[in-house]
Amino acid sequence: MAKPKTSTEEKFQNTDFPLFPALEAIDRKDYGFYDRLTEEQKKKFVPFLLVKWASAIDTRNKDLQGYYVRATDAAANKFLFNERVYDHAKLQWLMLCAISPEPQKQFHKYIPQIKESVIRLREPATIKDIKEYYTKVYPKADKESINEIAEAFVTEHKKKCYLAKTFPTLKQSDIDILTQLVTDDDIKAYERDRGN
């Protein structure tokens, strides 16, 4: 006979968002899955997390892997945070279900992430952290390539952090563009003109 669940166990079970069943429901195009969630689970529905997981499948079929990345971007990522869509969780769920090409379960793998404070330009990236990140993302890449990519990332990120700190009202997209236009010499000249 099964041991009866305590009220704490039942409450915990009813409040956690079922990540892996949700991914399977996306693969199966289960449009009614969101409706079957409890109110507590609906509060913990995080579309960004599902986009990240749904886009990465582990299969030998490189075409299917590529399809999932492109389909995730086209069906969900581009519009998920649109001001007209953002407050409509059910619509976001339906967009996520549009990712799968056919109702078939896939193995979704975790994609590592760079620290949020680095992404938001609050602190500069370190070579060590970026090497670790790219080693996880590209496990078959050689160390020399990883080092080269990490150094390029850190150099560009340092410039982005400088621009974000110096001009705090700039949008992220403006900082991205300026990073491509402004040289290190331009920054030195600007600092010199400011008396620094």
Image: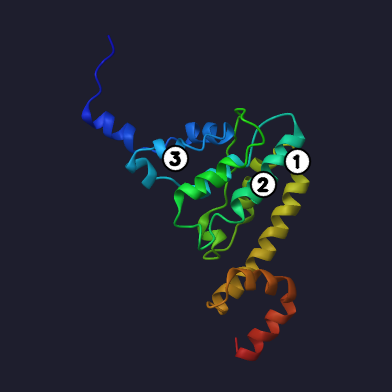
Question: What residue occupies the far top of the structure in this picture?
Answer: 1
Please tell me whether residue 52 is drawn above or below residue 151 in the rendered image: above
Picture quadrant of residue 158: bottom right
Left or right of 67, for residue 1: left
Label 1, label 2: how many angstroms apart (C-alpha)? Answer: 9 Å
Q: Residue at x 69, y 71 (%)?
A: 177
Q: Name the kind of residue labelled 1 in the image.
A: Ala
Label 1, label 3: how many angstroms apart (C-alpha)? Answer: 39 Å
Name the residue tied to disc 2: 134
Please tell me whether residue 32 is drawn above or below residue 1 in the rendered image: below
Please tell me whether residue 82 is drawn above or below residue 37 in the rendered image: below
Name the residue tied to disc 3: 34
Residue 79 or 108: which is nearer the viewer? 79
Residue neighbourhood size for the residue with mark 1, other residues' Cα within 10 Å, grouped as few (<14), some (14–19), many (≥20)? few
Name the residue tied to disc 1: 141
Give the percent coordinates (x, y) of residue 126. Answer: 60, 57
Q: Earlier in the sequence, mark 1 or mark 3?
A: 3
